Image (cartoon, helix red, strand yellow):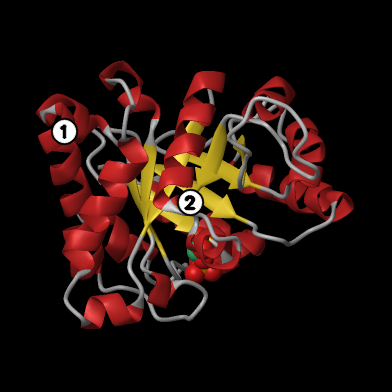
Amino acid sequence: MNRRYRKTIIAGNWKMNKTASETKVFLDELKGHVGRVKWCEVVVCVPYVDIPMALRALKDCRISVGAQNLHHEERGAYTGEVSAEMLKDLGVKYVIIGHSERRQYFGETDSLVNKKVHAALDAGLRPIVCVGESLEQRQAGITEELIVLQVKAALAGVPVEKMRQIVFAYEPIWAIGTGQTATSEQANEVCNLIRATIRKMHGARIARAITIQYGGSMNAGNAYELLAQPDVDGGLIGGASLKVPDFTAIVNAANQEQ
Ligand code: PGA
């Protein structure tokens, strides 16, 4: 991380876990530990139905609430979907876009990811855009090409003045939920590549201001080393965000004075 130029953000991705009642119990406890941290922003990306409860539980502290998805249209006949405006109106600040589970299980393509990025930005939400390669792609030596493509596709048509709203998360698919973390060098290398891609598109000032997280089995034991890398500006955390002590330890690793 490099706090001189950009914000460190630790975001929990709860995926399809916790009911509204469990959300309240969890967040009441969590805010006692990380509700006032100074050097990083803490976000919890909860299931849609838990959002009102999360916002209520966190109203008197600094932890922000995010969603895990949105629909790219403003409104209409899209049964079961939720728009950016609906999230914004509730008080949501962040939204995860293009998570590999959405790409894999729900057929989300790069072009859909791009539409969702636009929808989020238009509504005033901050997208956390996920990119990452599979094990086969890494072994085939196409990680670099793929990441550059995913970043460019996600950012297509995004005006330069909205770029600072965007957060990227490098999430190698082989590291998600597997307990197999990327080494800190691997994580930094790809986060650096994402930044270099943004630099080519929008220049050095924008590129160095963008928060780029690492995600994939980040935990209390490896967070410090990953976050010590110059281009790793935070984490998107699945499994370890569901336990207060683990998530607190990761936030503490990010919250050290530099
Ligand atoms: P994990 O998930 O921390 O459980 O590997 C990360 C993610 O999917 O965002």
Q: Residue at x 51, y 48 (%)?
A: 11
Kind of residue indicated by mark 2: Gly
Q: CA distance from mark 1 to mark 2?
A: 20 Å
Residue 184: percent from left, percent from top: 24, 67
- Of 198 and 51, the residue lying toward us: 198
In depth, the one of 218 and 200 nearer the eye is 200
Q: Is residue 231 visible?
A: no
User: Which quadrant would residue 180 be assigned to in this image?
Assistant: bottom left
Location of residue 105 with respect to 120 vertically, above or below:
below
Tag 1 near tag 2, CB within 8 Å: no
Q: Could you say which disc has been placed on residue 9 in the image?
A: none
Quarter of the rendering containing residue 16: bottom right
Q: Residue furthest front?
A: 77
Q: Is residue 211 above or below residue 217?
A: above
Q: Position of residue 232 (x, y in %)?
A: 27, 52
Q: Earlier in the sequence, mark 1 or mark 2?
A: 2
* Residue bearing the label numbered 2: 98
Q: What's the residue at 17%, 61% (across, down)?
A: 189
Residue 130 percent location from the top left of the image: 42, 52
Image spot of residue 225 (x, y percent): 28, 65
Q: Work out whether 153 lies above or below 118.
A: below
- The residue tagged 1 is 201
Mark 2: few/some/many CA within 10 Å (<14, 14-19, 20+): many
Q: Amino acid at mark 1?
A: Met
Disc 2 on helix, strand or loop?
loop
